[in-house]
């Protein structure tokens, strides 16, 4: 079957795919008439990219520009390129993307990469290539992390992703199972997906307003192998679900999403924590991550598999050993209830509470629309070339909010909200 021509053999997939495209444009981007769209996608995601293009133009887009990638071409570099070439990245391309964002373009990324694409490749070369890309992409990324534009991520069930998740199934059946999980998680299988997202966003908004009002000084996570206190940045605000960009457009950066999240203080995390799910990173599945923090910095880190990749990740730069995000997700979230390990952060981070190493978000401050870089840093915001989420929550983990006087009150018990 031509995987470029069709998404799946399942008869309901094409209709649902069109509904996902509609959600991407209307809920994810909330695209405005006259806006340009810069979209990135794998060539395997062409069916969804075409439908999103249709939906964007129907919504009044002035221009949709799609940049396609190809897994085989990515592998070709590792098989045939010279070693010195791995410190090169297309800065000219990313500069162009940043300029498009400055001119008001929206950003949409279709994700669904092969989790094991770079497995077996030289880890040092993978790290060098990713570092070069991160450095070149920084001007564009800073506009995204500062919420200067409306942007969103949406999934596509690539055959490689489906095979990684369901290795025991024939490929066509694996793809159909992954699509079914995607459509459920993105609320596309509901009678009115846009209305369902409105209701879901209202629930997340109520939760984040409550937590922002509590103004905790720290969160404490306790569970098997975990006793971690995450200090929160001064003047932090909780986000989740809908987000209003500096251009005034309110959209959903992540489709799907179940989290509420905020900015930790880069120097105020202490204790030890274990991952409750594996982390798929740079083609490697890192299992059983264990780290210990002192003064906000990881001082010990280990994993049962992927140790070298973990060490290279936290060695990316000084900020890579510090937290840039802490997020709360109930253990009963729909993605958690699915029982699936998606091997994709967009999904797995919405199955459990998590932390992220690296870059923090300016929008997670009460004055995030005006905060300067100097204030961002002074109040605890972390800066880094990376932002990597990994899961630390489960039905066995409790979370307390610690107020400025050191008093604790329950926020989550056995992975579920209290109150």
Image (cartoon, rainbow, N blue to C red):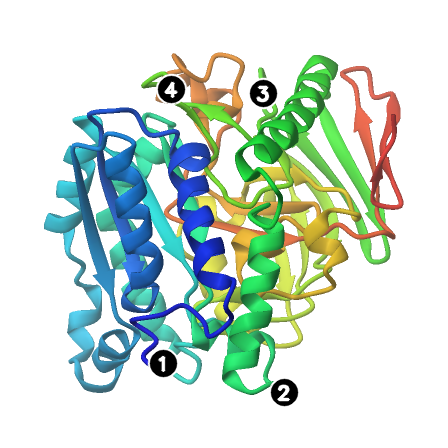
Instruction: Write down the residue under mark 3.
Output: 236
Looking at marks 2 and 3 on the same chain, the residue that comes earlier in the sequence is marked by 2
- Tell whether label 1 touches label 3 (CB within 8 Å): no
Looking at marks 2 and 1 on the same chain, the residue that comes earlier in the sequence is marked by 1
Looking at marks 4 and 1 on the same chain, the residue that comes earlier in the sequence is marked by 1
Determine the secondary structure under disc 1: loop
User: Percent x, y for residue 147?
Assistant: 38, 27
Q: Is residue 206 above or below residue 105?
A: above
Name the mark nearer the viewer: 2 or 1.
Answer: 2
Looking at marks 3 and 4 on the same chain, the residue that comes earlier in the sequence is marked by 3
Which residue extends farthest front?
A: 11
Q: CA distance from mark 3 to mark 1?
A: 40 Å
Is 165 or 2 nearer to us in this picture? 2
Which residue extends farthest left?
A: 92
The mark found on residue 195 in the picture is none
Q: Quadrant of residue 210?
A: top right
Determine the secondary structure under disc 2: loop
The mark found on residue 168 in the picture is 2
Name the mark nearer the viewer: 4 or 2.
Answer: 2
Determine the secondary structure under disc 3: loop
Q: CA distance from mark 2 to mark 3?
A: 45 Å
Instruction: Write down the residue under mark 4.
Output: 374
The reply to whether residue 258 is in sight is: yes
Q: Residue at x 75, y 32 (%)?
A: 219
Disc 4 residue crowd, few under 14, some 14–19, many 20+, Cα 10 Å: few
- Tell whether label 2 touches label 4 (CB within 8 Å): no
Q: Residue at x 44, y 76 (%)?
A: 159
Disc 3 residue crowd, few under 14, some 14–19, many 20+, Cα 10 Å: many
Instruction: Write down the residue under mark 1.
Output: 122
Name the mark nearer the viewer: 2 or 3.
Answer: 2
* 281 displayed left or right of 230: left
């Amino acid at each position: 079957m031509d995987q470029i021509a069709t998404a799946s053999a399942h008869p309901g997939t094409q209709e649902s795919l069109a509904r996902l495209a509609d959600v991407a444009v209307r809920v994810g981007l909330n695209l405005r008439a006259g806006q340009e769209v810069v979209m990135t996608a794998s060539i395997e995601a062409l069916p969804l990219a075409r439908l999103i293009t249709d939906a964007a133009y129907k919504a009044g887009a002035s221009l949709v520009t799609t940049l396609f990638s190809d897994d085989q071409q990515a592998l070709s570099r590792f098989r045939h390129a010279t070693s010195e070439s791995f410190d090169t990245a297309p800065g000219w391309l990313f500069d162009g993307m940043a300029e498009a964002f400055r001119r008001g373009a929206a950003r949409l990324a279709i994700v669904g990469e092969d989790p094991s694409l770079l497995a077996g490749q030289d880890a040092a070369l993978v790290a060098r290539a990713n570092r070069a890309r991160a450095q070149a992409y920084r001007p564009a990324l800073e506009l995204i992390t500062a919420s200067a534009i409306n942007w969103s991520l949406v999934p596509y069930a690539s055959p490689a992703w489906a095979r990684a998740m369901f290795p025991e199934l024939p490929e066509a059946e694996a793809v159909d199972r992954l699509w079914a999980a995607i459509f459920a998680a993105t609320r596309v299988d509901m009678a009115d997906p846009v209305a369902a997202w409105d209701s879901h966003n209202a629930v997340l908004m109520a939760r984040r307003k409550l937590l922002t009002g509590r103004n905790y000084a720290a969160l404490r996570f306790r569970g098997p192998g975990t006793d971690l206190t995450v200090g929160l940045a001064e003047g932090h605000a909780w986000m989740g679900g809908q987000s209003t960009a500096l251009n005034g457009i309110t959209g959903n950066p992540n489709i799907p999403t179940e989290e509420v999240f905020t900015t930790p203080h880069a120097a105020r995390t202490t204790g030890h924590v274990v991952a409750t799910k594996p982390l798929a990173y740079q083609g490697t599945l890192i299992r059983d991550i264990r780290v210990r923090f002192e003064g906000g910095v990881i001082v010990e880190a280990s994993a049962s598999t992927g140790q070298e990749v973990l060490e290279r990740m936290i060695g990316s730069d000084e900020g890579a050993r510090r937290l840039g995000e802490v997020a709360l997700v109930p253990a009963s979230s729909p993605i958690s209830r699915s029982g699936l390990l998606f091997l994709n952060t967009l999904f797995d981070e919405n199955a459990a509470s998590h932390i992220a190493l690296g870059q923090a978000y300016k929008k997670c401050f009460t004055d995030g629309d005006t905060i300067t870089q100097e204030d961002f840093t002074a109040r605890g915001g972390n800066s880094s070339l990376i932002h990597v989420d990994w899961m630390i929550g489960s039905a066995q983990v409790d979370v307390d909010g610690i107020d400025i006087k050191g008093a604790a009150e329950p926020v989550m018990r056995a992975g579920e909200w209290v109150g």
